[in-house]
Amino acid sequence: MSVKDLFAMANRTSLAENTSYLGRQEKLKGVSVPVNLSFAVSDLENSILRAKNIGANIALLSVQYNQNSTDSVMTSDTGNSKLQPIIDYCNSIGIAMGIRIMLPSPSNINPSDIVTWFTNYKQVCLDIAQLANQNSVKYLGISNELLLMTSGNHDKWQDIYTSLKSVYPNLLLFLTMSASEYKTCIILDLPDIIAVNLYPRITLLDTDETDENMRAAWYGNYSNVNLIDMLQKLKDTYSKPLWVTEVGCSPNNIALRDTAASSTFSSGEYSEETQEFYYKYIFEIIWQSSNIDCMSIWGVGSIAPAKTSYTFQRTLAEQIVKKYWEGEII
């Protein structure tokens, strides 16, 4: 039966209500918050509070630094001025925080002067670590999808890790990989927490695909990585907390072809049903995995849902999140 047929059979509440729940209340239930010029501070605050009200207990604040792929210098984005007020707000409402350091097109970062790049990047990490330490932020993401930088340079990453830990021993450091980075990353022995971003293509047929095939795609049908096997191997090999720091989908009828390619979604049609089914898979397959210690949904911050936006708030998918994170499903 195709997902399109399932749409026709299911009423809009039954998808959330009929899903089994394993009761893993000890997990961190996260939202990833892009702190940048695109969103006003008040919009970010409202989105974080809305997420907390349906069960989220951690906000991962993503701060952007600007850099051309071959340069060795990165500069703070002007949107980073919003970080302190957002931290203050999170502390005021009692939600835990992590800060993620982000570079544009991270998988293409390949500086011509490696030594200078690491010197500058270490200073960025130290600056954000100081801010985190001053504001009761427990977690710091020191790398996000830096594919070409984590396939080597172990000694330079070791230097960053040691420098941070010598000053802030209680700050927990995590490193986030893309699924493709998993096979090349050589520095997973360093961080306290290993993290991955998951945006699998689960169909080439949009909603004409079968439910069975969409589920199977998480095991590698449409990618070179078996995501479930990857999570198991990471847990078995390193015995560290394992986080999913980004996962999500736009409310767009073609989004399932490649959930990371929002820039191509302008040709699609707004479809909360497509997003809703994807969230059903996220929670049934990823959230309920015994290997996952935190799952954070990407894209909180938008005022209203749109076919090119990742927000789940104020959509049918929000009911899926609410049911699992409030533990209402028996």
Image: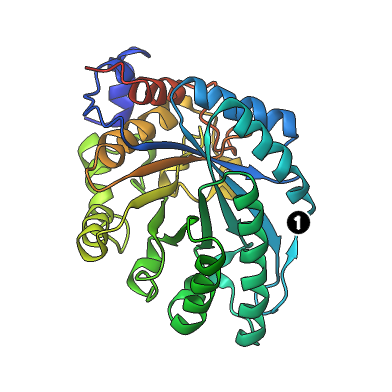
Does 192 sit above or below residue 284?
A: below
Circle count: 1
Whether residue 303 is visible here, answered yes or no, is no
Whether residue 10 is visible here, answered yes or no, is yes
Q: Position of residue 184 (x, y in %)?
A: 37, 75
Q: Nearer the viewer, residue 53 or 259?
A: 53
Q: Nearer the viewer, residue 296 or 317?
A: 296
Give the left or right position of residue 241, taking residue 298 as reference.
Answer: left
Give the left or right position of residue 153, taking residue 320 as reference.
Answer: right
Q: Position of residue 3 (x, y in %)?
A: 30, 30
Q: Nearer the viewer, residue 167 or 253?
A: 167
Give the residue pinned by disc 1. Answer: 77
The residue lying at 50 percent from left, 32 percent from top is 251
Q: Position of residue 282 (x, y in %)?
A: 34, 38
Quadrant of the drawing holding the C terminus: top left
Location of residue 69 (image quadrant): bottom right
Give the left or right position of residue 312, taking residue 257 as reference.
Answer: right
Q: How is the image coloured?
A: rainbow
Quadrant of the drawing holding the N terminus: top left
Q: Residues within 10 Å of mark 1 (few under 14, many from 20)?
A: some
Does 109 sit above or below residue 138?
A: below
Location of residue 41 (image quadrant): top right
The residue lying at 43 percent from left, 62 percent from top is 177
Q: Nearer the viewer, residue 113 or 38?
A: 113
**Secondary-structure class at tag 1:** loop
Does 69 sit above or below residue 62?
A: below
The residue lying at 48 percent from left, 55 percent from top is 170
Q: Position of residue 73 (x, y in %)?
A: 72, 75
Q: Of the residues shown, which amino acid type is indicated by label 1? A: Asp
